[in-house]
Amino acid sequence: MRKTLLTLAIAAAGVTVAHADEWFVEAHFPDQAALVRGAALFQHVIVDTERQVLRVDTDDEGIRQLEEAGLTVSIDAADTARMRSFYATIRDAIDARTPQFTDGGYPGIPGYTCYRTVEGTYQTMDDLAAVHADLVEVHSIGPSWRKTQNSAQGYEMRALRVTNLATAAADPNRPKMVVFGSIHAREYTPAELLTRMAEWLVQGYGTDPEATWLVDHVDFRFVLQANPDGRKKAETGLSWRKNADTANGNCTQNANWAGIDLNRNFPFHWNITNGQGSSGSKCDETYRGPTAASEPETQNLVAYVAGTPGTSGAYSGGVLPDRRPDDVSVASPDDYAGLFFDIHSYSQLVLWPWGDTTNAAPNRTPLQTLGRRLAWFNNYTPEQSDSLYPTDGATDDNFYGTLGVPAYTIELGVQFFESCSTFTSTTYPKNFAALRYAARAAAAPFRLPGGPDAYGITASAPATGAGGPYTTISATIDDQRYKSGTQTSFPIRAANAYIDRLPWEPGAAPIALAAVDGAFNGTTETVRGDLGLTGLAPGRHIVYVQGINTLGGGNGTPGTPNAVFVDVPDAPQMVTATPQVVGIGSIDPSMPQSVTLGSTLPFTVTPGIGQHIENVGGCPGTFTAPIYSAGPLVSDCTLTAAFAPDEFAIGGTVDGLSGNGLTLSLNGGSPESVAPDATSFAFAGTLPYGSAYEVTIMAQPASQACTVSNGSGTVEAAVTDIAVYCAPDASDIIFRDGFEP
């Protein structure tokens, strides 16, 4: 019956003969015991508990073993076709002998160029360190197995350090986040996920507020290729899991099954499950090696992360501190700062210790809490590592067991050789988000996940109010972000903002934010508040937001913070326009006016009575009476308004003038002649408003005598009422009357 099933599956899938003995299968388990038996046969399975189905890629032998374990096996023709399409793609790419590159220009795996090769990964590390020497270091941590055999072969293992190196020495307690990638060689996705995260941290520094504060306050250590020898074999399409040790791990049955499973070779509780959590057979995928930490890769990783044990058994000299005795019943202190992750593929799980026993770890509750938080982001199943089957000599148990660091394994995606489209659209973004959350909690991973998460933080552009400049901060505080039906979410109690200091840093001053709906009573709250910016130096500042729930009563439990940039503008450059009046008139405003550089300022220019505006200038601008718009003002200036009195003509009427010779003088000035028979006169010049005038007769006309009336006064308008009266001279009158003179 099974052979018939396989034959039909081959026909339905239309697959090639390459790797034709490998299938993607669904195995139905009737009960939990059957699931445990079936899962224990493999290291990576996807479990659908609702359908009671275990999904895995395997060969004919694996199908036989599943059936013997009591599971009913059927072949997923579509996924089998996709898996075999991968093999065909990579084979064709290798046969073409054409170099393959990622979109970023780094050497990529043939046919799957979204994944960098070992060389592409190392080149990326070198480039990041060269361009961002203030943020990145590349550490050599020891040779791979092949390099120990021949210095011209194999690889020097590397760790990529990302943190603000300028401040690291002054911050020795900065939490360390150590992450391994692709310790199982055929798992393409982990190394690429971590490489992209490292690029985001470095390239986002100074422009992305989350990347910036994480680089400033977390010391990241990425071992991107934790098994470079094995990975190089897997890049050819081999389903290679182990390292390349053909001495300790020589398999005479099949050379492609050689090597040591590095994730069963770590020293803590190595081989403690008596063969259930690892294998003693060299050809098995989980071969643990002849002794604990027999492999140079394991030794390098332990020495880098933990250091070396002293006579008391306590480790020192590694990246992470040893804060827990090796007694499995003793909890790590809840203020442990730092995290460890080992990233694998492909079972869609978030796992925490222990893996070698069903007993709960002494820090079970906070380990579970953080695990369920992480699973919210990637929608994976969160559970203790031994839930499906035991493991021993694994990385997460090793570092939690020896150091007390919160340690996790995340099983990514849906396949070892996952398609680039699935990785870039789903696996990468979901797990990138999960690891960012972990980094936000790294300062207190046993505490902060018990509180709510803060996200969606925004800051309005700075504005000026009655109290000076301010920005409005908005955020969402959420305690529901768990992947679990049993984890309790607590109401939000409060939310605070902090300027330029994390909430737990000395001198951090909380600024209360308010619930937008008026009360803190829900497990998710939108919060908002105005932050005054007075006294802050111009330039970029970072504002952290942290929520607090009611867990634990009293002051509640603070959660993971996040941040937003606030750019405080430079203090405006001020310029002053000083009004000045020459003559009789006014400028309003009349006092010096200080405004920001580039402003325009209106002045009202008003002449006094009997005055007129002669000139306005001294500051740039335009004048449309009566408004002078001074601006744009780029420097101090004096706005001068010059006023002058109005000028008026002086004249009047003449009555009785018949002869020549009448001359008049204005204010004793030059005489001006009045024509015979004239009935009016006007002086050639004018007099200003308010001045005195006096008209006198300088010479009488022949045979006449003239007098002046209204001949003096003050000029307030044109003078036209001066009257000159002329009559015959008296002597002439006597002569004409016959009298002798």
Image (cartoon, grey):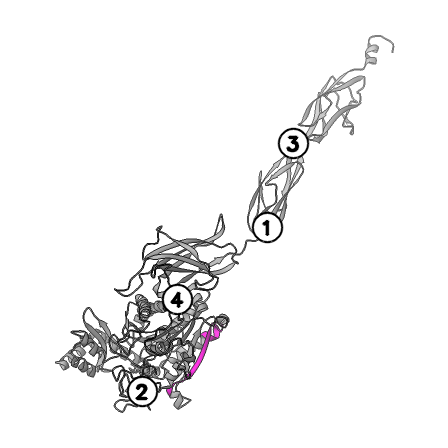
Label 3–label 4 contact, CB within 8 A: no
Marks 2 and 1, Cα distance to the nearest angstrom? 79 Å
Q: Is residue 727 left or right of residue 314?
A: right
Label 1–label 4 contact, CB within 8 A: no
Q: In what element is the residue under mark 4?
A: helix
Taking the magenta stretch, the answer to whether it contains residue 142 is: yes
Q: In what element is the residue under mark 1?
A: strand
Residue 447 is drawn in which quadrant? bottom left
Res. 610 mark: 3
Assign the N terminus to one quadrant of the image. Answer: bottom left
Marks 2 and 3, Cα distance to the nearest angstrom? 112 Å
Circle 1 sits on which residue?
575
Assign the C terminus to one quadrant of the image. Answer: top right
Q: In what element is the residue under mark 3?
A: loop
State which region is magenta. Answer: 128-145
Mark positioned earlier in the residue sequence (2 or 4): 2
Label 2–label 1 contact, CB within 8 A: no
Marks 2 and 4, Cα distance to the nearest angstrom? 37 Å
Label 1–label 3 contact, CB within 8 A: no
- Amino acid, disc 2: Gly
For the residues carrying marks 2 and 3, which lies nearer the camera in this image? Answer: 2
Circle 2 sits on which residue?
289
